[in-house]
Image (cartoon, rainbow, N blue to C red):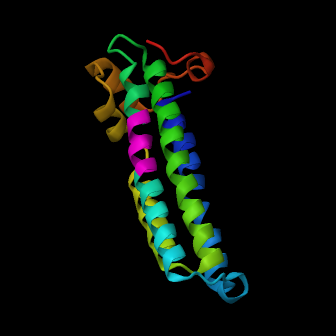
Amino acid sequence: MTSKEYFKKLRLIYFVFLTSIIPILGIATFYNDLLMLELDGSTALILSIVLVLIGSSTVVIGFLIFKVITSKITKESSIGQKLAAYQHAFLIRSALIEGIALLSAATYAITSFEIALIISALLFAVLFVLKPSPKKLKKVFDFSPTEIARIDSGTDQIVTKKDLSGKLTA
């Protein structure tokens, strides 16, 4: 697989993560009166604290997992191994953020609790910023000039099925 094909597939996955939140928010907006549960003051406060804590801790955990996975790759690793590690780490980080964003959106759909909508929107913005690109990949790993040229060309076969299905150890 070429780097161009690799990023095309990774961006498609990214697009699915990004757009999965929108239908729930749409349903919440249009069917708000049908799904609404009334919350008293203390329940609303507890729910807001829980959502903020879970949302922020999930983002932090996602970034830490990303860092741990990508730090296992050495400079001597092949381009394919580096791209496989990046993809693996990207998917885990995005799935964690998307999961909490969906939970917040569903909470808003059921309760009409505005803080849940705000948290979902903030997590959507974080997910939006995480769009994979060759530039971001180059910031994560230490590539040689030859490897950078191969990635930038977009035509060299740099990722094999073995790279994407093998262990992510250096």
Q: Which residue occupies the foreground of this view, 9 or 74? A: 74
Give the farthest residue toward the bottom: 33
- Can residue 22 be seen in the rendering of this structure? no
Give the farthest residue toward the front: 42
Residue 103: x and y in percent read 59, 61
Q: Which residue occupies the foreground of this view, 32 or 124? A: 32
- Total marks shown come to 0
In the depicted structure, whether residue 99 falls above or below residue 22: above
Residue sitting at 38 percent across and 36 percent down?
A: 64
Q: Which residue occupies the foreground of this view, 79 or 109? A: 109
Indicate the quadrant where residue 71 lies. Answer: top left
* Left or right: 54 in relation to 150: right
Residue 76: x and y in percent read 35, 10
In the depicted structure, whether residue 138 falls above or below residue 13: above
Q: Which residue occupies the foreground of this view, 118 or 124? A: 118
| Viewport quadrant of the N terminus | top right
Part of the protein shown in magenta: 57-65
Residue sitting at 37 percent across and 38 percent down?
A: 134
Residue 58: x and y in percent read 46, 48
Q: Is residue 63 magenta?
A: yes
Residue sitting at 50 percent across and 51 percent down?
A: 97
Magenta stretch mostly in which secondary structure? helix
Residue 34: x and y in percent read 73, 86
In the depicted structure, whether residue 43 falls above or below residue 54: below
| Viewport quadrant of the C terminus | top left
Q: Is residue 111 magenta?
A: no
